[in-house]
Image (cartoon, rainbow, N blue to C red):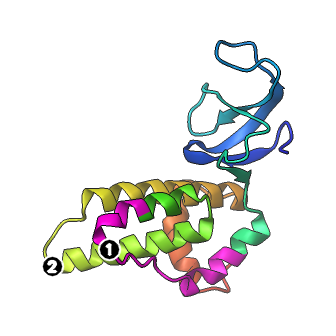
Amino acid sequence: MFEKGQYIIYGRSGICKVEDITHLSIAGADKKKLYYVLAPLSSKGSKVYFPVEKKKAHARELITEAEAWELLDEIRDIKEIRVSNEKFREDTYKQAFDSGDYRQWVAMIKTLYQRRNARFAQGKKMAATDERYLKMTEEALYSELAFVLKKKKDEMGTFITEYITTPTNRT
C-alpha cells in the first residue's frame, strides 16, 4: 500500500504524488472502497483516482536513487527487444511500455534508436508508431530518472549518453 505524500508511477500518468487515501463521494465511485487520490506531476491541477485494492493498477514505487545508478551502469548490457513478427511490433511496444519496468523501457529505447538509424541509413523516415513509442518511453524513463537523480528532464538524454561513455562520472 502506498502512503500519503509518497511519489509513485501510475500507468501513463507518470510520476504522481499520493495526495490522499480516502472514500470518494463522487458519481460512479464505490463509497465503501478506499481510493488513492493522485496528482500527476505532468498535469498540474488534474487528479487521478484508483481503488486501493485494485491489483492490476499499473502503479509502482519510484525507482530509488541507488537503483537509478545501477540501471545507468547496466544500460550497455540491456538487450534490444526482439520482434519476431512485424505485425506484432506495436503490441510488443505497448506491452513493454505498460509493464512499467524501466529495464524494458531502456530495451525499447535502444530498439527504437537502432530502427531509426537503420531507416535513416536507407533514406527513410522513422515510422510513426516507432516515433510515438520512442517519445512516450523517453518521457517516462527520463522523467523518473531526472526526478530521483535531481536532474533536469530535458538534459537526461545527454546525461545518460555521457554517463555510459564515462561511467566514473557520477555528477
Mark 1 vs mark 2, foreground winner is 1
Q: Where is residue 141 in the image (x, y as percent from the top left)?
A: 57, 60
**Which is more toward the observer, 40 or 151?**
40
Q: Position of residue 56 (x, y in %)?
A: 67, 48
**Which is more toward the observer, 68 or 159?**
68
Residue segment shown in magenta: 70-91
| Residue drawn at (29%, 70%) of the image | 86
159 in the magenta segment: no
Give the Cα distance between marks 1 and 2. Answer: 21 Å
| Residue drawn at (26%, 56%) of the image | 128
Quarter holding the N terminus is top right
Numbered mark located on residue 122 in the image: 2
Q: Where is residue 4 in the image (x, y as percent from the top left)?
A: 85, 36
Please name the amino acid that badge 2 sits on.
Gln
Please name the amino acid that badge 1 sits on.
Asn
Secondary structure at numbered mark 2: loop
79 in the magenta segment: yes
